[in-house]
Image (cartoon, helix red, strand yellow):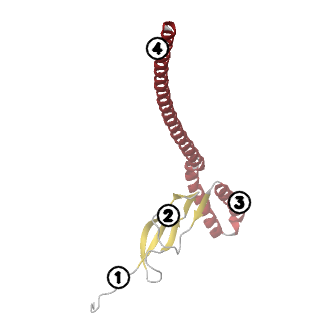
Amino acid sequence: MKDERDDSEEKTEEEAGEAASSEQDGAAAAEEREKLVQALEQKTKEAAEANEKYLRTYADFENYRKRMQRDLAEFRKYANEQLVLELLPVVDHLGLALKHGAEAGEAAQGLQQGVEQVYKQLRDVLEKSGVKRFSAEGEPFDPAKHEAMMQVLTADVPENTVVQVFQDGYLYHEKVLRHAKVSVSKKPQPEPVGSNA
């Protein structure tokens, strides 16, 4: 019986030891699980931050790419601006030659027709390239498009109206390439009442 008691005490101690060991294992497992959960949360947070950083970088790159495409399109659109600017005096002189040729009469009629064809062809080429001539006579003065060369006193038209164009203006696409040189109306000052000379 003593043996049975010893055996049962041993079993109880063993079971108690196993239970204590099991509790320690459970506590260690819970602690390990908590560490893993914290590590997972940390890695999830880092992954979210990295993803957010990637998305911001990607958006910045897309914005940069779009800006570069716009800049390139703008460059291509206005790449010939200097050439066109240098051709405008040629167009002006051809126009003057036509005007003087018409005044010369029949003797210069053949020359006049040749100059007319060259003038028309050059204007067509410029127009295909995005150059448009604009005349401003009768329009309100706009400093963005017109350059006032002089003022004319007149009551016939509203004040600040273009009354004469000395040189046509040109647009290159939508941009003013050369301002039209014009004279602008100005209302005459009323005579003071009672002033007799």
Q: CA distance from mark 3 to mark 4?
A: 120 Å
Lower position in the chain sequence, tag 3 or tag 2: 3
Q: Is residue 33 visible?
A: yes
Tell me if label 3 and label 2 are in contact, CB under 8 Å.
no
Q: Position of residue 167 (x, y in %)?
A: 53, 64
Secondary structure type for disc 4: helix
Residue 110: name its quadrant: bottom right
Q: Is residue 82 above or below residue 114?
A: above
Lower position in the chain sequence, tag 2 or tag 1: 2
Residue under label 2, please give it: 145
Residue under label 1, please give it: 189
Residue under label 3, please give it: 117
> Number of callouts in the render?
4
Q: Label 3 crowding class (10 Å Cα cut-off): few <14, some 14-19, many 20+?
A: few
Q: Is residue 96 visible?
A: no
Q: Label 1 crowding class (10 Å Cα cut-off): few <14, some 14-19, many 20+?
A: few
Q: Nearer the viewer, mark 2 or mark 1?
A: 2
Q: Which residue is pictured at 51% across the width and 40% down the height?
A: 56
Identified by mark 1, the residue type is Gln
Q: CA distance from mark 3 to mark 2?
A: 29 Å
